[in-house]
Amino acid sequence: MEDDKPSVAYFCMEYGLAEEMKIYAGGLGILAGDILKTAKEQDWPMIGIGILWRQGYTKQVINEKGRPVDTYPRNDYMYDYLKDTGIKVHVRIKNEEIACRVWRLEKYNNAPLYLLDTNLEENSNKWITGQLYGWFEEERIAQEIVLGIGGVKALRKLDFEPDIYHFNEGHAVLAGTELIKEKTKSGLSFEEAYSQTREEIVFTTHTPVEKGNEEHSMRVMKYMGAFNGISEEEMERIGGNPFNMTAAGLRLSKAANGVSQIHKETARGMWEHVDDRPSIQGITNGIHRDTWVDSEITGAEGKEEIWKRHTELQRALIDYVKDRTGVSLDQNKLIIGFARRAAPYKRANLIFSNKEKISPHLESGDIQLVFSGKAHPLDDTGKGIITELVDKSEEYPESVVFLEDYGIEIARFLTRGVDVWLNNPRRPKEASGTSGMKAAMNGVLNLSVLDGWWPEACRHGKNGWQFGDGYEGEDQDEHDRQALYEVLLEEVLPTYYDNKEQWKRMMLESVASTYHEFSAKGMLEKYYEKLYKPT
Ligand SMILES: *Cc1c(COP(=O)(O)O)cnc(C)c1O
């Protein structure tokens, strides 16, 4: 271990380490998993704190009417390889003691991950750590008490003395109350404890959508026991009233970051009204290459080598799609991938929005589309979007495919095996977008609006394409629709079908221009340099 590196306890609600380990929902967890793998690889002193979800996030399948349906198989049988640390901690929830067992997970070449679990005989409520992002406000607060307050208590018993507590998103901010409480117990005033605690915490914000930033009423927080011995007035100073988890994360930290350069600007605007907070820096996400990137692609010495390997990876995707859906995609025709959370701002259906333009290409099959994604279980609009995509796959059965239950496995196949990775969120709502990095490093060309990470990497026509020129007017949908068709039909298609040599050059350039810049190792080095460094 390098002794000049501060030790870090990384807190996150979810960790995406492997498909089988169902304790993640999406991008936030994937980032956390990639960080722990990178810390392990570099032998940097970091551990993760999280929750052992019994059911995890929804396993979302499509019913015969084309509607997404949420199912929650228990995943307990998967957990044989967890190690019981023998440690138990207690938190108070609704005036009741809840015991949390602490498990240790190290199976995936990751820095040690400690997972809290309330599924114990002695607990009246065993299901607090049941569903990730499931249920309603009270359950969420209870889960956050376990993660934050239970997490700090677990660290004490584990004898891990972190220099830095890193909260990845607002879910962990109640850890701040425990850090303050420890200090007031040993005789400090609230004021002193608060200011010392702020020297230990750093915070990453991810959500440029107002609604996605969690807020709770003081009344419910208090009733749940989330104040943790801190007065209402003091809690209000930290998180405002209602208590905003992101505002609290900012006010509790000495340093904070957004996850791309453009997101830094958005986040600064969003949280300008929060007084007494650190300046939000921009540290662009990165990906763990060994997890996501094919080493034969990145090692390819020239156009023919990269193309040959690409056709192999594409074959694997085509077989996978055939297996899951019965559809046989044509390897000699362009395959476009699009996989993300089904939120309206991602505009999954943008490519279908001018039927006259797109329909001939889907009928002839010279454009093939593979979609995947989940909607949040309580999001009916998102479920409507998925149904629309499923309908399109029925309208164009040969050339449009929807893969149900998006997760790590599908993401790995898609970001290696398609030709083009399409991304068209309404600007500026995409915080970073690491799936595009996975694609880029696998020689899959990005076709994306200038949002999230892409403005930092895009060289139009050289390593991928942008469309829409970063336009943000009221008619952004119409503007981007036209721009998408223009670039897709006048640049992407002709390059693919008529200029394969240029296509292969672009693949090489896509890999070369992203390989170092967007690795999780580079990101983590910036964390150490800009967030974790002693002040
Ligand atoms: C990489 C990944 C994400 C994040 O990708 P975005 O570009 O932010 O949508 C989400 N889910 C899975 C399963 C992933 O592998």
Image (spheres, grey):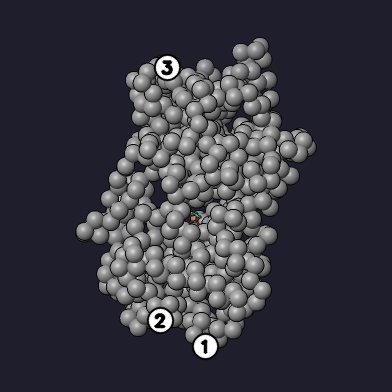
**294 lies left or right of 531:** left
Spot occupied by residue 242 in the image (x, y as percentages of width and height): 46, 32
Spot occupied by residue 61 in the image (x, y as percentages of width and height): 30, 53
- In the displayed image of the protein, which residue is found farthest to the front? 80
Picture residue at 59% right of the left edge, 59% below the top: 453
Between 43 and 214, the residue placed more toward the observer is 43
**Which quarter shows the C terminus?**
top right
> Pointer 1: what residue?
498
Q: Is mark 3 within 8 Å of ligand 1?
A: no
Q: Of marks 3 and 2, which one's residue comes earlier in the chain?
A: 3
Mark 2 burial class by Cα count in 10 Å: few <14, some 14-19, many 20+: some
Mark 1 burial class by Cα count in 10 Å: few <14, some 14-19, many 20+: few
Is residue 489 visible in this depiction of the protein?
yes
Is residue 418 visible in this depiction of the protein?
no
- In the displayed image of the protein, which residue is found farthest to the left? 65
**Which quarter shows the N terminus?**
top right
> Pointer 2: what residue?
366
Please state which amino acid type lies under the numbered disc 3.
Answer: Glu
Q: Is residue 174 above or below residue 386?
A: above
Picture residue at 46% right of the left edge, 64% below the top: 414
Q: CA distance from mark 1 to mark 3?
A: 68 Å
Please state which amino acid type lies under the numbered disc 1.
Answer: Asp
Question: Element type at marker 1?
Answer: helix
> Pointer 3: what residue?
97
